């Protein structure tokens, strides 16, 4: 954690040094978020405050530094670069699995592939990789589509192997965001139905050929344990929060869960909240709830605005899948506790949604995409039909 923080902050400082411009409008959100975090720290002074519990400061710093990082990377083709980076990660996971290094873990009486130590972050990365690969396959032609299509299938296989249900929620949220930002919702809905059919077919093949763990978890084969005991845990955490409107102190949940899962009435056990709004309400009280709502809500609004004006369909999909991942992980997982994943994805999302930070494709990329879109649209000036986007 300390090493990652030092490296991450150093990269942000280097970017600021290379491009030391300041646009006050871009700092409004991170300043307000930092203000709420400071209030929580002041309220926590009487307790046993641990600076490492304030790791949420890293995503906030990422939002503030995004314009500088974006300028430092310009004019790189960010979707293509990220596709390569995520592909290397997925390939490394496959190699680890084949080598038998931390190949599997047992969770809730089910074996799930877990070479990285976090099935949640692996499923998230696999989902993002699959979306990036789809965009690259759409841009490519002929045999050049083989690599991105293969990576999309490999990434989805990694997601299925983790048996993480949050990935399904992420894809569902992505569909809603795509509909919300589409100029032709009927066409978008048809595309989503087709994509859903393909995903269902791939899941069926995975279930029949490789493993049925994911399918059984999706249909709630574990009965009362479908949510891993999260519902009664959420009720407990909300009761704790109600007793302290100013919060129990940042890091309270971690301290309670440090020595295992405490027992509750009825033979049940307490789990992490698996909901960042509840967790920050417990730890930070009303200021914490307001801060996390502003963080997630503010970045979602920026993502929707950016997606509506994006000219590169790959950038649009990247923005929306990152926003969908943030929303799903915040509602169903401990997103900002996975600080490595949340900090990097927040930095990328901020780079794509803050006007001064947007990374443009390399020279010529937009022209190629534009020509392809024009051919697909039949974009003649004399055409009377509405000019629709090529990828929705």
Image (cartoon, rainbow, N blue to C red):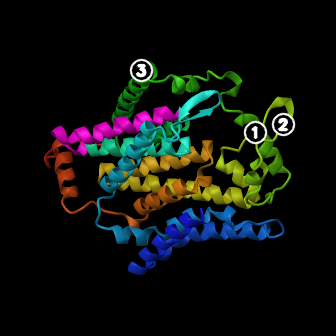
Of the numbered discs 3 and 2, the one sitting upstream in the chain is 3
Q: Quadrant of residue 216?
A: top right
Relative image position of residue 114 (x, y in whole percent): 53, 39
- Residue 375 visible? The answer is yes
Q: How far is disc 1 from disc 3 in space, using C-alphas?
A: 36 Å
Q: In the visual, does 276 lie left or right of 164?
A: right
Q: Residues within 10 Å of mark 2 (few under 14, many from 20)?
A: few
Residue at x-position 40% and y-position 56%: 306
Q: How far is disc 2 from disc 1 in space, using C-alphas?
A: 9 Å
Residue at x-position 82% and y-position 45%: 239
Quadrant holding the C terminus: top left
Q: Is residue 254 covered in magenta?
A: no
Q: Which residues are magenta?
A: 138-163
Residue 376 higher or lower than 12, as above or below: above
Q: Where is mark 2, residue-wise?
A: 264
Is label 3 in a helix, a strand or a loop?
helix
Majority SS type along the magenta span? helix
Q: In the visual, does 385 lie left or right of 174?
A: left
Residue at x-position 22% and y-position 40%: 145
Relative image position of residue 316 (x, y in whole percent): 36, 50
Of the numbered discs 1 and 3, the one sitting upstream in the chain is 3
Point out which mark residue 298 bears. Answer: none
Q: Where is mark 1, residue-wise?
A: 233
């Amino acid at each position: 954690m300390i090493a990652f923080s030092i490296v991450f902050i150093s990269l942000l400082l280097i970017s600021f040094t290379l491009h030391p411009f300041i646009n006050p409008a871009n700092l409004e959100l991170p300043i307000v978020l930092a203000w709420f975090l400071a209030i929580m720290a002041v309220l926590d002074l009487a307790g046993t405050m641990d600076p490492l519990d304030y790791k949420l400061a890293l995503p906030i710093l990422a939002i503030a530094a995004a314009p500088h990082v974006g300028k430092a990377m310009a004019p790189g083709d960010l979707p293509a670069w990220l596709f390569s980076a995520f592909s290397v990660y997925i390939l490394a996971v496959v190699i680890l699995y084949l080598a038998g290094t931390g190949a599997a873990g047992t969770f809730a009486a089910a074996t799930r592939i877990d070479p990285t130590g976090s099935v949640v972050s692996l499923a998230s990365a696999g989902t993002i990789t699959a979306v990036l690969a789809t965009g690259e396959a759409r841009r490519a032609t002929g045999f050049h589509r083989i690599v991105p299509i293969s990576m999309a299938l490999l990434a989805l296989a990694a997601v299925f192997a983790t048996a993480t249900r949050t990935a399904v929620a992420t894809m569902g949220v992505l569909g809603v965001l795509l509909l919300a930002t589409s100029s032709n919702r009927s066409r978008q809905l048809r595309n989503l139905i087709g994509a859903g059919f393909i995903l269902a077919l791939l899941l069926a093949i995975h279930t029949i050929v490789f493993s049925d763990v994911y399918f059984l978890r999706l249909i709630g084969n574990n009965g009362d344990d479908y949510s891993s005991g999260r519902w009664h845990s959420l009720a407990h955490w909300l009761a704790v929060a109600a007793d302290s409107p100013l919060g129990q102190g940042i890091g309270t949940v971690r301290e309670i869960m440090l020595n295992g899962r405490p027992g509750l009435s009825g033979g049940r056990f307490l789990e992490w909240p698996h909901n960042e709004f509840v967790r920050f309400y417990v730890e930070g009280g009303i200021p914490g709830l307001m801060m996390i709502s502003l963080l997630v809500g503010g970045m979602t609004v920026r993502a929707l605005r950016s997606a509506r004006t994006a000219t590169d369909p790959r950038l649009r999909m990247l923005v929306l899948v990152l926003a969908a991942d943030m929303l799903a992980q915040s509602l169903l997982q401990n997103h900002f506790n996975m600080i490595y994943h949340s900090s990097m994805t927040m930095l990328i999302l901020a780079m794509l949604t803050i006007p001064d930070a947007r990374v443009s494709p390399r020279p010529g990329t937009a022209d190629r995409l534009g020509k392809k879109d024009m051919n697909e649209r039949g974009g003649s000036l004399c055409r009377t039909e509405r000019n629709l986007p090529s990828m929705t």
